[in-house]
Image: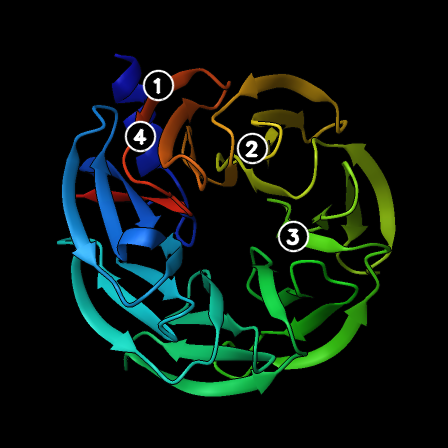
């Protein structure tokens, strides 16, 4: 019965989130960079369903109901896959050092940061090609888009001293409109579910700064684990939690969105830096020991299995 409820929660996820809003089989897509593979893992059994060859050094993966994007840094490529049948649709090349991808909510576009060139690449998913590249600042790395898809924040480096803000009202033609001083070496950043705040993690401190999305001013600081931290929010319509990983600590903190207090700290495999959510599921992957961990929204471990020498990133898909 619990798995039925979990799957129902996945199906209820709004479009543009990590999980697919269609019925079927929940599957974790994990990047195994040392093997140049994307591994599809059945949940919660942990059975490996498929191993897809990727261009060299696949690091980050994101999904929607229809597509997945896998970014291969050393290969200078971005692979577009169809999630319904888990097949490669096209390999996009011509990047110097691509790193992070995201899908624009409710639009047929995706964005990819290119560290070396300081660019944001715009991918038209309907045409399956890059249609524009915008200079945003050298080191362009982690990024986050507002739920209404009108603003994009980009960290200029894994230890960013500056964040670039873009207007994405016209998703195919984003434009730079300003910069934010994070007040330290920013690492990851995510818009809150309501779109009114931007949470920023750091590489030089055990805390998270929360910025007002409109004024771009820091309004709060909360406790986190050892840096660098990554974070994701639960994806219910009335989101309650932030999930903050500290790979060096081997911890996942469940933080209240209401007051910023840590509600629970869960032990996860060391090296579990990246985290993603879908419905009532939380997924992390360990870069150092290749372990995939699946948890429910309250931090109860549903699966813990080693699937590769190194598991860089993970996203949720739902197969028919």
Find the distance from the CA under tag 2 to the CA under tag 4.
33 Å
Look at the numbered disc 1 and give the secondary structure of its residue. Answer: strand
The colour scheme used to paint the residues is rainbow
- Residue ID for mark 2: 238
Check contact, mark 2 vs mark 4: CB within 8 A.
Answer: no
Check disc 1 and report the residue beneath it.
Answer: 302
User: Closer to the camera: disc 4 or disc 3?
Assistant: 4
Q: Residues within 10 Å of mark 3 (few under 14, many from 20)?
A: many
Q: Nearer the viewer, mark 2 or mark 4?
A: 4
The residue carrying mark 4 is 306
- Residue 86, percent from left and from top: 17, 54
Q: Name the element at disc 4.
A: strand
Q: Residue at x 70, y 70 (%)?
A: 165
Q: Earlier in the sequence, mark 4 or mark 3?
A: 3
Q: In the picture provided, is 12 more to the left or to the right than 276? A: left
Q: CA distance from mark 4 to mark 3?
A: 28 Å
Compared with 98, 250 (above or below) is above
């Amino acid at each position: 019965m619990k798995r039925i409820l979990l799957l129902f929660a996945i199906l209820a996820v709004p479009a543009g989130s990590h999980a697919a809003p269609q019925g079927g089989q929940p599957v974790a897509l994990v990047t195994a960079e040392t093997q140049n593979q994307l591994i599809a893992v059945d949940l919660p059994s942990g059975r490996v369903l498929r191993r897809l060859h990727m261009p060299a050094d696949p690091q980050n993966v994101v999904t929607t109901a229809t597509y997945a994007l896998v970014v291969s840094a050393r290969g200078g490529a971005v692979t577009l896959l169809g999630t319904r049948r888990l097949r490669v649709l096209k390999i996009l090349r011509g990047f110097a050092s691509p790193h992070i991808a995201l899908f624009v909510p409710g639009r047929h576009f995706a964005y990819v940061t290119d560290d070396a060139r300081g660019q944001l690449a715009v991918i038209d998913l309907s045409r399956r090609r890059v249609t524009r590249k915008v200079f945003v600042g050298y080191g362009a790395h982690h990024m986050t888009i507002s739920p209404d898809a009108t603003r994009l924040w980009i960290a200029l480096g894994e230890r960013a001293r500056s964040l670039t803000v873009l207007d994405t009202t016209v998703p195919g033609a984003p434009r730079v409109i300003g910069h934010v001083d994070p007040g330290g070496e920013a690492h990851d950043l995510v818009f809150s579910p309501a779109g009114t705040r931007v949470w920023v993690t750091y590489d030089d401190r055990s805390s998270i700064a929360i910025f007002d999305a409109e004024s771009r001013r820091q309004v709060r600081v909360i406790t986190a684990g050892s840096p660098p931290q990554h974070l994701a929010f639960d994806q219910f319509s009335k989101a309650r939690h932030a999930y903050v990983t500290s790979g060096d600590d081997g911890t996942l903190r469940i933080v209240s969105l209401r007051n910023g207090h840590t509600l629970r700290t869960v032990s996860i495999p060391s090296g579990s830096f990246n985290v993603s959510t879908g419905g009532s599921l939380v997924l992390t992957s360990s870069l150092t020991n290749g372990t995939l961990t699946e948890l429910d929204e309250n931090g109860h471990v549903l699966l813990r299995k080693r699937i590769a020498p190194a598991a860089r990133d993970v996203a949720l898909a739902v197969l028919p």
